[in-house]
Image (cartoon, rainbow, N blue to C red):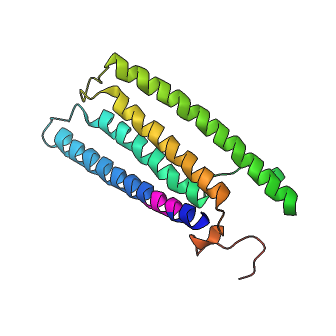
Amino acid sequence: MRQFLLGFGRTISGIGLGVAGACLIIVTAINGANVVARYVFSQPFSWAEEAMVYIMIAGVFWGAAAVAWRQVDIHIDAFVNLASGRLRAALHTFATLISIVILCTLFWMSLRVTSQLYSFGQRNDALGMPVWIAHVTFASGLLLIILMTVARLFAPEDPDAQNPGKQAPGKDG
């Protein structure tokens, strides 16, 4: 089971990074093309700003799945770091469980909003795209973060395994 979770986490992390990278490239291309269209041809794209925002949201939340898997997010773990041994492990598990509860709540609320937007059939002005599609990227990103956090809870790995340049605290190099 542990090997399955590690493989699953690495795969989803890679996909998340790939999507985030693709989104960054697409946003850069749209922005560059819009600058040329605006200042060279005096005809900016009316849809560019809105499209870039939606693409950035997708990139951030899908990329955050990789961050959750690799555990390189910002932690407020002063109390956890003061503890040692079993207490430290218990506090880390407790903090992870709190994170999962918060993420699940956000995911549930996001699904409700997305469902409402879908039922309204609302479209954005500039793109003419159904608004719920942009909200699905937020919800799906949250789901991936939840899955990565749960997988990491049940299949912990040496955090330096994917970050060879990072030295673990207390290890001399």
Farthest residue in the top direction? 120
Q: Main secondary structure of the magenta part?
A: helix
What x and y, as percent, mark residue 75?
A: 69, 51
Q: Residue 155 lies in magenta, yes or no?
A: no
What x and y, as percent, mark residue 24?
A: 36, 52
Tell me: 93 left or right of 138.
right
Q: Give the residue drawn at x 26%, y 50%.
A: 29
The reply to whether residue 37 is in sight is yes
* Placement of the C terminus among the 4 image quadrants: bottom right
* Placement of the N terminus among the 4 image quadrants: bottom right
Tell me: 111 left or right of 154.
left
Rendered view: 49 above or below 13: above
What x and y, as percent, mark residue 168?
A: 71, 71
Tell me: 64 left or right of 98.
left
- Of residues 53 and 10, which is closer to you in this image? 10
Q: Residue 9 lies in magenta, yes or no?
A: yes
Q: Give the residue drawn at x 41%, y 32%.
A: 135
Q: Which residues are magenta?
A: 8-14
- Of residues 100 and 125, which is closer to you in this image? 100
- Rendering quarter of residue 85: bottom right
Q: Give the residue drawn at x 22%, y 31%.
A: 46
Rendered view: 9 above or below 144: below
Q: Give the residue drawn at x 40%, y 53%.
A: 20
- Rendering quarter of residue 47: top left
The reply to whether residue 83 is in sight is no
What x and y, as percent, mark residue 48?
A: 26, 37
Rendered view: 124 above or below 161: above
